[in-house]
Image: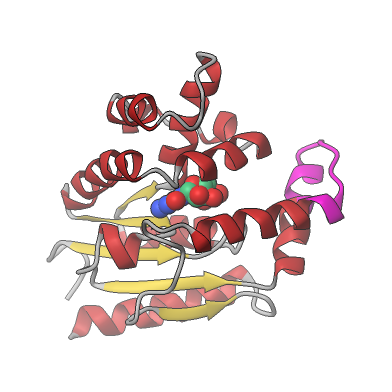
Amino acid sequence: MTSQAKHIVIAVDGPAAAGKGTLSRKLAVHYGLKHLDTGLTYRATAKALLDRGLPLDDEGVAAETARALDLSGLDRTVLSVHEIGEAASRVAVMPQVRQALVEAQRAFAGSASGAVLDGRDIGTVVCPDALIKFYVTASPAVRAKRRHDEITGNGGSADLASIQADIEKRDARDSERADSPLRPAADAHLLDTTEMGIEAAFEAARRLVDAALER
Ligand code: C5P
């Protein structure tokens, strides 16, 4: 059976810079599905607050901002800067913000022929009934190196040690929060990309999705 024949949702979770975005985009193209990087929804909420000079920790204001978000206007280039990632993980601890964004993410997942969503809580909270779930991880050193190379490759300058420290701090905040902490769903397939290139990870994921589609 092909992806066109039934509504399919692919959930991809994992810590920062593990390769889940690249993997998700490749899966979306391969199966003809829409893709949502849910991290961008938290980043856009944080950026809207910062732009208006509003505090990041006022739950009512942040939730209102999250509810007003237009998913079609998320600009990856603008939102990918490091400071916004840090602010996003602070905004993401607030349950009312999560509730507003999860609602929008579920609506996205339910539309058209299906979707690939990547984030921290897709398999556990947003789409617990997804056809298939992946948890993509890699060692903090490898993740920091990838983020570093991405920044320098785009002409920026970056310090490897401080990137790794920031990644570890964000992982800790994401894993230790009370609402929807970062963790693999019980039925997620683990993909450790520490040694594996993205092509190999994609091939492994594709075989698992094909098998799930046959069931
Ligand atoms: O994946 P990305 O680095 O863009 O995510 C930014 C932040 O948004 C994460 O550190 C996390 O705190 C939050 N996030 C989340 N749940 C998601 C996606 C992202 O809490 N599903």
In the displayed structure image, the side of residue 154 where residue 6 appears, left or right: left
Q: Answer whether residue 77 is visible to the viewer in this image.
A: yes
Magenta region: 148-162
Residue 25 at what x, y percent from top left?
Answer: 45, 55
Location of the N terminus (image quadrant)? bottom left
- The percent position of residue 173, horizontal first and vertical second, equals 56, 55
Secondary structure mainly formed by the magenta segment? helix
Residue depicted at 15% across the width and 61% down the height: 7
Q: Is residue 150 magenta?
A: yes
How many tags in the picture? 0
User: Residue 142 location, x and y as percent?
Assistant: 74, 68
Residue in view at x 39 percent, y 43 percent? 94
Q: Where is 131 relative to 76, above or below?
A: below
- Nearer to me, 64 or 5: 64
Which residue lies at the image location 27% right of the left edge and 57% below the top edge?
A: 126
Residue 115, position as x, y percentages in the image: 28, 55
